[in-house]
């Protein structure tokens, strides 16, 4: 394969360009007084029905994993679920490749259903498709059940990215050995946290995987590598570009919610106004619910209808703002907010009332990970953000983690284990065969790699792209730039595999 320079990439795809981001006295004063520190936005949230749309054929299998790969201690093992398809695999004799998707923080069937790109390209490569589930999610529960696995800090202590990567490495190595497929190249795929895992696995286990497609992977969203305001600034700009009045309505709403909640019977009125299933206990719960909707809308601001998180129309932020702005004159701020947020939470019109908490146990796995090693500083700026202004407050964040899990975060561990500072030099010297794909509508893009590092560590950045849109199934509604982006990704992956075979053949010839 001939190496592609940045210039040739720009000539090939004029709609794909390389960008490097830089990075109301409303509730700001109150937030600052209280030492306010928001929880880290989750990548996914509550999924819609994963069985809608395309269906993919696979077998569900289980593999016995060590609880702790880095200790000789005789700890109980657990069953890791994985999905496998050998339908198009050309087999070990022809060294057919293995496409391994690095499972995220959720049920692996959700990711399999929403990662159609891997299934779409497997036939042309003659590839096996493998979707291993991340430990502590879905059915892959240590100690035999979710209740026991999530019981306390001791039982949760093995929920780490390092252990998950080791699971993937052990699984695929064992699988290849059992199939006499040691010579079959492995290509990694991952979106969001899964994209981070794909990147780190390529760097940590280069002898196991020949390359990685990391889509929407915020590997730089740690410590002081990117400004902490980046995420919420991008969410806000997505709304502002659709409608300034929509942006302003949302920005005003936070103070209005607090003001209403302080009135006699105010919480009850807010419960009624937002059609909540249970009585609102504090205004912060409603604000967090709205915050999540806006953040997720920015992530899945796809140009066509989708149901990755919720059933949504194409360009959902445009629809949210249209709903808010088209309310009759005299409509209150909160009524406009309800009309807009209903696009996210109730686009089908079938929801009778809204639950604010989609995790009744309050100890879902991602919150644990965010409180231990996945410490991503977040803040909201006064100038650019439509959210309440607040600074990143590590002390407050640490207190919250101790209250929830009785643990102290390790804010520098990820960069110690996987790197991040001076990432350009590190990836240029030690990295190869990694694609970082990002859409600038995605708020997580601000924490990813948005520039070419070398001829084999490539950044594909699209102006209109949202959260790992390139990993979704191809549709007749795909814009030209998305079709071109996927074609280029296929070309790069093909080059990795050809280069692997060429080098392998050269070694055997010698």
Image: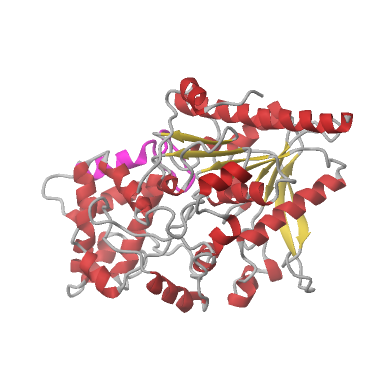
Q: Position of residue 63 (x, y in %)?
A: 77, 56
Which residue is nearer to you in this view: 147 or 94? 94
Which residue is nearer to you in this view: 338 or 238? 238
Tell me: 390 left or right of 175.
left
Which residue is nearer to you in this view: 433 or 131? 433
Residue at the spot x=15%, y=50% of the render? 331
> Against 428, is 174 above or below?
below
Image quadrant for the C terminus? top right
Residue at the spot x=20%, y=51% of the render? 249
Residue at the spot x=44%, y=29% of the render? 16
Image quadrant for the N terminus? top right
Q: Position of residue 468 (x, y in %)?
A: 50, 41
From where the camera sits, is residue 348 visible? no
Q: Position of residue 62 (x, y in %)?
A: 76, 55
> Against 262, is 485 above or below?
above
From where the camera sits, is residue 378 visible? yes
Residue at the spot x=11%, y=50% of the render? 330
Q: Position of residue 107 (x, y in %)?
A: 60, 54
Is-magenta flag for residue 503? no
- What colour scheme has been applied to the protein in the rendered image? secondary structure
Residue, far left:
330
Is-magenta flag for residue 321? yes
The residue segment tinted magenta is: 302-325
Which residue is nearer to you in this view: 10 or 286? 10
Tell me: 141 left or right of 280.
right
Tell me: 249 left or right of 120.
left
> Against 436, is 399 above or below?
below
Q: Residue 463: name its quadrant.
A: top left
Residue, far top:
11
Q: How many dots with numbers?
A: 0
């Amino acid at each position: 394969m001939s190496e592609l320079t940045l210039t040739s990439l720009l000539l090939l795809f004029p709609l794909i360009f390389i960008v490097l981001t830089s990075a109301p006295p409303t509730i700001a004063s109150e937030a600052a007084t209280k030492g306010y520190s928001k929880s880290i936005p989750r990548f996914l949230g509550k999924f819609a029905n994963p069985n809608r749309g395309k269906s993919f054929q696979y077998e569900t299998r289980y593999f016995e994993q060590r609880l702790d790969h880095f200790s000789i201690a005789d700890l109980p093992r657990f069953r890791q679920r994985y999905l496998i398809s050998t339908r198009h695999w050309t087999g070990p004799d022809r060294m057919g490749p293995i496409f391994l998707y690095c499972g995220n923080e959720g049920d692996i069937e959700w990711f399999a259903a929403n990662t159609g790109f891997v299934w779409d390209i497997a036939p042309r490569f003659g590839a096996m498709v493998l979707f291993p589930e991340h430990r502590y999610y879905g059915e892959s529960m240590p100690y035999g059940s979710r209740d026991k696995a999530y019981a306390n800090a001791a039982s949760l202590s093995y929920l780490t990215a390092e252990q998950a990567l080791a699971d993937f490495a052990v699984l695929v190595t064992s699988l290849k050995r059992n199939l006499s497929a040691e010579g079959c190249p492995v290509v990694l795929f991952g979106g969001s946290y899964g994209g981070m895992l794909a990147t780190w696995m390529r760097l940590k286990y280069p002898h196991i995987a020949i390359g990685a497609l990391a889509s929407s992977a915020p590997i730089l969203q740690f410590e002081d590598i990117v400004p902490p305001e980046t995420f919420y600034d991008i969410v806000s700009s997505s709304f502002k570009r659709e409608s300034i009045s929509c942006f302003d309505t949302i920005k005003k709403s936070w103070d209005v919610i607090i003001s209403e909640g302080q009135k006699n019977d105010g919480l009850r009125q807010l419960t009624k106004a937002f059609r909540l299933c249970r009585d609102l206990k504090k205004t912060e719960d409603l604000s967090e619910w709205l915050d999540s909707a806006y953040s997720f809308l920015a992530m899945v601001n796809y140009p066509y209808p989708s149901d990755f998180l919720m059933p949504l129309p194409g360009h959902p932020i445009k629809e949210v703002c249209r709903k808010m702005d088209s309310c009759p004159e005299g409509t209150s701020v909160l009524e406009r907010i309800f009309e807009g947020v209903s696009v996210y939470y109730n686009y089908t019109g079938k929801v009778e009332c809204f639950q604010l908490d989609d995790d009744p146990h309050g100890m879902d796995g991602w919150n644990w990970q965010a409180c231990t090693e996945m410490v991503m500083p977040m803040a909201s700026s006064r100038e650019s953000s439509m959210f309440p202004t607040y600074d990143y407050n590590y002390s407050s964040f640490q207190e919250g983690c101790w209250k929830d899990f009785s643990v102290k975060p390790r804010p520098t561990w990820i960069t110690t284990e996987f790197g991040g500072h001076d990432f350009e030099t590190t990836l240029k010297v030690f990295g190869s065969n990694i694609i970082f794909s990002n859409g600038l509508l995605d708020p997580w893009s601000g924490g990813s790699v948005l520039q070419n590092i070398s001829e084999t560590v490539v950044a594909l950045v699209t102006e209109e792209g949202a959260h790992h849109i390139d990993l979704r199934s191809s549709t007749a509604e795909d814009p030209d730039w998305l079709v071109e982006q996927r074609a280029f990704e296929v070309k790069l992956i093909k080059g990795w595999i050809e280069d692997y075979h060429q080098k392998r053949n050269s070694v055997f010839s010698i």
